[in-house]
């Protein structure tokens, strides 16, 4: 999902009616609203998140490092979102991954696109976070190929 579609994926992952139906989640330029950073209901659940470094609508970075909240500056009053690193850390914890993300080489970094991954996750799941430099509130040109590459091996995992 992209933008609001990405935000909806977090709801699908935590809702008992839908969570067990997905083998993985791939939000693009979307994070849960602040206070709604729920882990996946049925881990292990693969995760590949993409955020634009310069996005002012759903910013990937926290405005205040101590609270993990990113603030939308595109609209008056602004919306409050969970910062990208807080999202991926929560999913990594739920998936039993090591707590510190590591820079990823090929195939996930796609030529140094700013991707990190949490390693040694339960059940072979992966948690990947890509904050692409220069990107705004749009999908990077490499996202489709990267997400297909990431999800294709998991396609038969979903019930």
Image (cartoon, grey):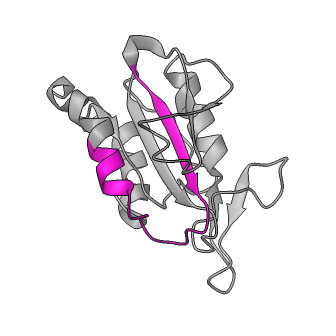
Q: How many marks?
A: 0
Query: Left of 82 or right of it: where is 4?
Result: left
Q: Position of residue 59 (x, y in %)?
A: 63, 64
- Residue at 29% x, 39% y is 149
- Residue at 52% x, 23% y is 94
Residue 140 part of the magenta segment: yes
In this view, the residue in front, 70 or 37, is 70
- Residue 143 sits in which quadrant? bottom left
Q: Position of residue 140 (x, y in %)?
A: 43, 64
| Residue at the extreme bottom of the image, as rendered | 76
Query: Left of 96 or right of it: where is 71?
Result: right
Please indicate, yes or no, whether residue 28 appears anywhere in the rendered image. yes
- Residue at 27% x, 31% y is 23
Query: Left of 148 or right of it: where is 80?
Result: right
- Residue 106 sits in which quadrant? top left
| Residue at the extreme front of the image, as rendered | 111
Q: Position of residue 36 (x, y in %)?
A: 56, 48
Quarter of the C terminus within the rendering: top left
Q: Position of residue 85 (x, y in %)?
A: 65, 43
Q: Magenta stretch: give its range.
A: 125-148
Residue 144 part of the magenta segment: yes
In this view, the residue in front, 112 or 3, is 112
In this view, the residue in front, 35 or 21, is 21
In this view, the residue in front, 131 or 62, is 131
- Residue 158 sits in which quadrant? top left
Please indicate, yes or no, whether residue 21 appears anywhere in the rendered image. no
């Amino acid at each position: 999902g992209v933008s609001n579609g990405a935000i909806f994926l977090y709801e699908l992952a935590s809702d008992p009616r839908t969570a067990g139906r997905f083998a993985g989640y791939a939000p693009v330029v979307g994070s849960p609203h602040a206070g709604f950073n729920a882990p996946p209901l049925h881990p292990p659940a693969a995760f590949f998140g993409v955020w634009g470094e310069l996005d002012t609508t759903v910013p990937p970075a926290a405005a205040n490092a101590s609270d993990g909240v990113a603030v939308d500056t595109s609209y008056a009053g602004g919306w409050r979102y969970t910062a990208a690193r807080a999202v991926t850390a929560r999913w990594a914890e739920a998936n039993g991954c090591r707590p510190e993300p590591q820079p990823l080489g090929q195939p996930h970094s796609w030529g140094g696109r700013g991707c990190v991954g949490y390693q040694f996750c339960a059940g072979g799941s992966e948690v990947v976070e890509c904050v692409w430099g220069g990107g705004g509130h749009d999908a990077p040109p490499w996202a489709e190929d990267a997400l297909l590459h990431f999800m294709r091996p998991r396609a038969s995992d979903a019930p």
